[in-house]
Image: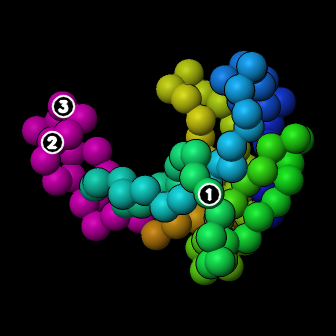
Amino acid sequence: MIKLSDSAKKELDAYFEGKDKGTIRVFLAPGGCSGPRLALALDDAGDEDEKEEVAGYTFCINKDLLSQIKSAEIDLTPLGFAVEPEVPLPAGSGGGCGGCCGGCGSN
């Protein structure tokens, strides 16, 4: 269900050094013009979640979301964690950068 790159694991190791490891939720975050995206947050698992242990970390994800995306790969980018679903999420209706509010500086 969850794949964790070596660089993402190293970043999690650094974050949790000297702390209790909390459950990490994979969730659907709003994405504006480009549509929804997957993101991470610390959160307790609930009855509607699937849990999985990966590389010493506990991840949870809503069962309905998991059935939609099948699995997710967590990697580290210069901007932070990137969570890529196996099955792509639907794109937003704004057409991407500049399609709605000129959000990327395009007119």
Residue drawn at (73%, 33%), measured in percent from left and top?
20
Q: Which residue is mark 2?
A: 102
In the image, residue 45 sits, relative to residue 66, either above or below, namely above
Residue drawn at (50%, 26%), measured in percent from left and top?
79
First in sequence: mark 1 or mark 2? 1
Q: Main secondary structure of the magenta part?
A: loop
In the image, residue 44 sits, relative to residue 63, either above or below, namely above
Q: Which residue is mark 1?
A: 44
First in sequence: mark 1 or mark 3? 1
In the image, residue 80 sits, relative to residue 27, either above or below, namely above
Query: Which amino acid type is shown beneath numbered disc 2?
Result: Gly
Residue drawn at (77%, 64%), measured in percent from left and top?
51
Whole-percent x, y for residue 39 in the image: 53, 49
Whole-percent x, y for residue 57 in the image: 80, 44
Q: Nearer the viewer, residue 10 or 104?
A: 10
Residue drawn at (47%, 55%), measured in percent from left and top?
37
Which is more foreground, mark 1 or mark 3? 1
Query: Which amino acid type is shown beneath numbered disc 3?
Result: Gly
Magenta run includes residue 103? yes
In magenta, the rendered stretch is: 91-107
- Decide if residue 51 is on the left or right side of residue 43: right
Q: Secondary structure at mark 1?
A: loop
Figure quadrant of residue 9:
top right
Q: Are marks 2 and 3 in contact (CB under 8 Å)?
A: yes
Q: Secondary structure at mark 3?
A: loop
Query: Which amino acid type is shown beneath numbered disc 1?
Result: Asp
- Decide if residue 11 is on the left or right side of residue 68: right
Q: CA distance from mark 1 to mark 2?
A: 37 Å
Whole-percent x, y for residue 85 in the image: 65, 59
Which is more foreground, mark 1 or mark 2? 1
Q: CA distance from mark 2 to mark 3?
A: 6 Å
Q: Which residue is mark 3?
A: 105
